[in-house]
Image (cartoon, grey):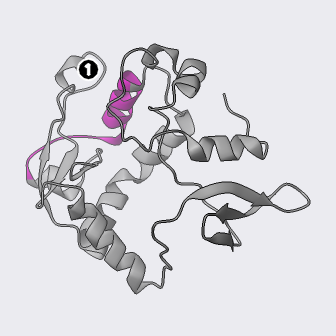
Protein backbone atom coordinates (compact mmCIF):
# COMPACT_ATOMS: atom_id res chain seq x y z
CA UNK A 1 0.00 0.00 0.00
CA UNK A 2 2.94 2.35 0.39
CA UNK A 3 1.36 3.51 3.63
CA UNK A 4 -1.70 5.02 1.98
CA UNK A 5 -5.36 4.37 2.66
CA UNK A 6 -7.59 5.87 -0.02
CA UNK A 7 -10.89 7.28 1.17
CA UNK A 8 -12.94 10.23 0.06
CA UNK A 9 -16.25 11.77 0.86
CA UNK A 10 -15.25 13.82 3.90
CA UNK A 11 -13.04 11.97 6.38
CA UNK A 12 -12.11 13.76 9.59
CA UNK A 13 -8.54 14.23 8.31
CA UNK A 14 -9.79 15.69 5.03
CA UNK A 15 -11.94 18.15 7.00
CA UNK A 16 -9.04 18.96 9.37
CA UNK A 17 -6.89 19.86 6.34
CA UNK A 18 -9.71 21.96 4.85
CA UNK A 19 -10.31 19.54 1.98
CA UNK A 20 -13.87 19.65 0.69
CA UNK A 21 -15.10 16.35 -0.71
CA UNK A 22 -18.40 14.50 -0.97
CA UNK A 23 -19.35 10.90 -1.62
CA UNK A 24 -20.84 11.95 -4.95
CA UNK A 25 -17.61 13.69 -5.98
CA UNK A 26 -15.49 10.70 -4.95
CA UNK A 27 -17.80 8.37 -6.85
CA UNK A 28 -17.47 10.54 -9.97
CA UNK A 29 -13.68 10.42 -9.64
CA UNK A 30 -13.63 6.62 -9.26
CA UNK A 31 -15.90 6.21 -12.28
CA UNK A 32 -13.56 8.39 -14.33
CA UNK A 33 -10.38 6.55 -13.40
CA UNK A 34 -12.09 3.15 -13.69
CA UNK A 35 -13.09 3.83 -17.28
CA UNK A 36 -15.76 1.13 -17.09
CA UNK A 37 -13.41 -1.61 -15.84
CA UNK A 38 -14.50 -1.25 -12.22
CA UNK A 39 -17.25 -3.25 -10.56
CA UNK A 40 -20.17 -0.87 -9.89
CA UNK A 41 -21.27 -2.68 -6.74
CA UNK A 42 -17.73 -2.69 -5.32
CA UNK A 43 -17.26 1.00 -6.15
CA UNK A 44 -20.59 1.89 -4.51
CA UNK A 45 -19.61 -0.05 -1.37
CA UNK A 46 -16.23 1.67 -1.19
CA UNK A 47 -17.80 5.09 -1.60
CA UNK A 48 -20.63 4.42 0.86
CA UNK A 49 -18.38 3.08 3.62
CA UNK A 50 -15.03 4.79 2.94
CA UNK A 51 -15.40 7.50 5.58
CA UNK A 52 -16.54 5.10 8.31
CA UNK A 53 -13.77 2.64 7.38
CA UNK A 54 -11.17 5.41 7.66
CA UNK A 55 -12.55 6.47 11.06
CA UNK A 56 -12.49 2.82 12.23
CA UNK A 57 -8.84 2.50 11.17
CA UNK A 58 -7.88 5.75 12.87
CA UNK A 59 -9.97 5.47 16.04
CA UNK A 60 -10.50 1.76 16.75
CA UNK A 61 -7.55 0.04 15.09
CA UNK A 62 -4.96 2.66 15.98
CA UNK A 63 -3.55 3.55 12.58
CA UNK A 64 -1.78 6.90 12.84
CA UNK A 65 -2.29 9.06 9.78
CA UNK A 66 -0.04 11.99 8.98
CA UNK A 67 -1.85 13.79 6.19
CA UNK A 68 -4.03 13.47 3.11
CA UNK A 69 -2.37 13.87 -0.28
CA UNK A 70 -3.32 13.88 -3.93
CA UNK A 71 -1.92 10.81 -5.70
CA UNK A 72 -1.25 12.53 -8.98
CA UNK A 73 -4.19 12.14 -11.35
CA UNK A 74 -6.86 14.18 -9.58
CA UNK A 75 -6.17 17.22 -11.74
CA UNK A 76 -6.33 15.12 -14.91
CA UNK A 77 -9.83 14.01 -13.91
CA UNK A 78 -11.12 17.50 -13.06
CA UNK A 79 -13.65 17.47 -15.91
CA UNK A 80 -15.38 14.57 -14.10
CA UNK A 81 -14.82 15.40 -10.43
CA UNK A 82 -13.58 18.33 -8.37
CA UNK A 83 -9.95 17.51 -7.45
CA UNK A 84 -9.55 16.49 -3.81
CA UNK A 85 -6.80 14.78 -1.82
CA UNK A 86 -7.95 11.30 -0.75
CA UNK A 87 -4.75 9.35 -0.09
CA UNK A 88 -4.35 9.19 3.68
CA UNK A 89 -0.65 8.69 4.44
CA UNK A 90 0.42 6.89 7.62
CA UNK A 91 3.02 8.41 9.94
CA UNK A 92 5.34 5.53 9.02
CA UNK A 93 4.98 6.35 5.30
CA UNK A 94 4.88 2.63 4.49
CA UNK A 95 2.48 -0.31 4.49
CA UNK A 96 3.66 -1.29 7.96
CA UNK A 97 1.71 1.71 9.26
CA UNK A 98 -1.45 -0.13 8.26
CA UNK A 99 -0.44 -3.78 8.61
CA UNK A 100 0.94 -3.66 12.18
CA UNK A 101 -2.14 -2.07 13.76
CA UNK A 102 -4.46 -4.31 11.73
CA UNK A 103 -2.50 -7.40 12.80
CA UNK A 104 -2.62 -6.28 16.43
CA UNK A 105 -6.38 -5.66 16.27
CA UNK A 106 -7.04 -8.99 14.57
CA UNK A 107 -4.93 -10.76 17.21
CA UNK A 108 -6.87 -9.01 20.00
CA UNK A 109 -10.18 -10.34 18.67
CA UNK A 110 -8.84 -13.89 18.39
CA UNK A 111 -7.94 -14.23 14.74
CA UNK A 112 -5.87 -17.34 14.02
CA UNK A 113 -2.85 -16.63 11.82
CA UNK A 114 -0.95 -19.22 9.82
CA UNK A 115 2.14 -17.97 8.04
CA UNK A 116 4.15 -19.28 5.08
CA UNK A 117 1.15 -21.08 3.65
CA UNK A 118 0.06 -21.53 0.04
CA UNK A 119 -3.55 -22.12 -0.93
CA UNK A 120 -3.82 -24.81 -3.59
CA UNK A 121 -7.55 -25.20 -4.22
CA UNK A 122 -10.94 -24.58 -2.67
CA UNK A 123 -12.94 -27.31 -0.94
CA UNK A 124 -16.67 -27.53 -1.72
CA UNK A 125 -19.55 -29.52 -0.28
CA UNK A 126 -22.07 -31.63 -2.25
CA UNK A 127 -23.94 -28.47 -3.32
CA UNK A 128 -20.69 -26.86 -4.59
CA UNK A 129 -20.67 -24.32 -1.71
CA UNK A 130 -17.10 -23.39 -0.73
CA UNK A 131 -16.43 -24.69 2.78
CA UNK A 132 -12.66 -24.57 3.01
CA UNK A 133 -9.27 -24.47 1.37
CA UNK A 134 -6.63 -27.10 0.69
CA UNK A 135 -3.10 -25.78 1.36
CA UNK A 136 0.49 -26.94 1.58
CA UNK A 137 -0.12 -27.21 5.35
CA UNK A 138 -3.35 -29.19 5.21
CA UNK A 139 -7.05 -28.44 4.90
CA UNK A 140 -8.82 -25.59 6.64
CA UNK A 141 -12.60 -25.33 6.82
CA UNK A 142 -14.88 -22.54 7.92
CA UNK A 143 -18.49 -21.46 8.08
CA UNK A 144 -17.54 -18.67 5.66
CA UNK A 145 -14.56 -18.62 3.32
CA UNK A 146 -13.18 -15.36 1.99
CA UNK A 147 -10.80 -15.55 -0.94
CA UNK A 148 -8.59 -12.49 -0.47
CA UNK A 149 -5.65 -12.96 -2.78
CA UNK A 150 -3.65 -10.64 -4.97
CA UNK A 151 -4.80 -9.50 -8.38
CA UNK A 152 -3.55 -10.81 -11.70
CA UNK A 153 -1.24 -8.14 -13.11
CA UNK A 154 1.49 -10.80 -13.60
CA UNK A 155 -0.77 -13.28 -15.40
CA UNK A 156 -0.69 -12.47 -19.13
CA UNK A 157 -3.47 -14.93 -19.95
CA UNK A 158 -5.93 -13.38 -17.48
CA UNK A 159 -4.92 -9.90 -18.60
CA UNK A 160 -5.54 -10.75 -22.26
CA UNK A 161 -8.97 -12.17 -21.40
CA UNK A 162 -10.22 -9.60 -18.89
CA UNK A 163 -8.14 -6.43 -19.33
CA UNK A 164 -6.54 -6.57 -22.78
CA UNK A 165 -5.52 -2.91 -22.69
CA UNK A 166 -3.18 -3.77 -19.79
CA UNK A 167 -1.67 -6.93 -21.29
CA UNK A 168 1.11 -5.16 -23.15
CA UNK A 169 4.43 -4.35 -21.54
CA UNK A 170 5.62 -5.39 -18.11
CA UNK A 171 3.67 -5.31 -14.86
CA UNK A 172 4.78 -3.25 -11.91
CA UNK A 173 2.54 -5.25 -9.58
CA UNK A 174 3.79 -7.70 -6.99
CA UNK A 175 5.34 -10.89 -8.33
CA UNK A 176 2.59 -12.74 -6.45
CA UNK A 177 -0.20 -11.16 -8.52
CA UNK A 178 -0.89 -14.26 -10.60
CA UNK A 179 -4.64 -14.51 -10.10
CA UNK A 180 -4.38 -17.67 -7.98
CA UNK A 181 -7.56 -16.95 -6.03
CA UNK A 182 -9.46 -16.04 -9.18
CA UNK A 183 -8.36 -19.28 -10.82
CA UNK A 184 -9.33 -21.33 -7.73
CA UNK A 185 -12.77 -19.69 -7.77
CA UNK A 186 -13.23 -20.42 -11.48
CA UNK A 187 -12.26 -24.08 -10.88
CA UNK A 188 -15.28 -24.47 -8.59
CA UNK A 189 -17.68 -22.65 -10.89
CA UNK A 190 -17.26 -18.92 -10.24
CA UNK A 191 -18.31 -16.96 -13.30
CA UNK A 192 -15.63 -14.63 -14.61
CA UNK A 193 -16.58 -11.75 -16.86
Residue in the picture at 32% in, 54% down: 51
Q: Is residue 180 left or right of residue 33?
A: right
Residue labelled with disc 1: 77
In this rendered view, identify the residue nearer to me: 83 or 100.
100
**Quarter holding residue 60:** bottom left
Q: Residue at x 69, y 63 (%)?
A: 134
Q: 26 or 132: which is nearer to us?
A: 132
Residue 160 placement (x, y as % from top left):
55, 18
> Of all residues shown, which one is farthest toward the right?
126
Q: Which stretch did the figure color magenta?
A: 17-33
Question: Is residue 31 rendered magenta in the image?
Answer: yes
Residue 81 location, quadrant: top left
Q: Quadrant of the C terminus?
A: top right
Residue 138 in the image: state x and y as whole percent. Answer: 66, 71
Of 72 and 134, the residue lying toward us = 134
Vertical arrangement, residue 97 with respect to residue 31, above or below: below
The kind of secondary structure element at disc 1 is helix
Residue displayed at 75% across by 43% down: 187
Q: Residue at x 15, y 52 (%)?
A: 15
Percent position of residue 180, x then y: 58, 44
Amino acid sequence: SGGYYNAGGGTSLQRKQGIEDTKENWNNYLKAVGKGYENDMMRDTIVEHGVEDYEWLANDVGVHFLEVQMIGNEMAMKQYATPAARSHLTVEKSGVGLSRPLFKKADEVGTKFIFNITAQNLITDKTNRVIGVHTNKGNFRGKNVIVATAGYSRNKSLLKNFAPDFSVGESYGSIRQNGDGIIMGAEVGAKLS
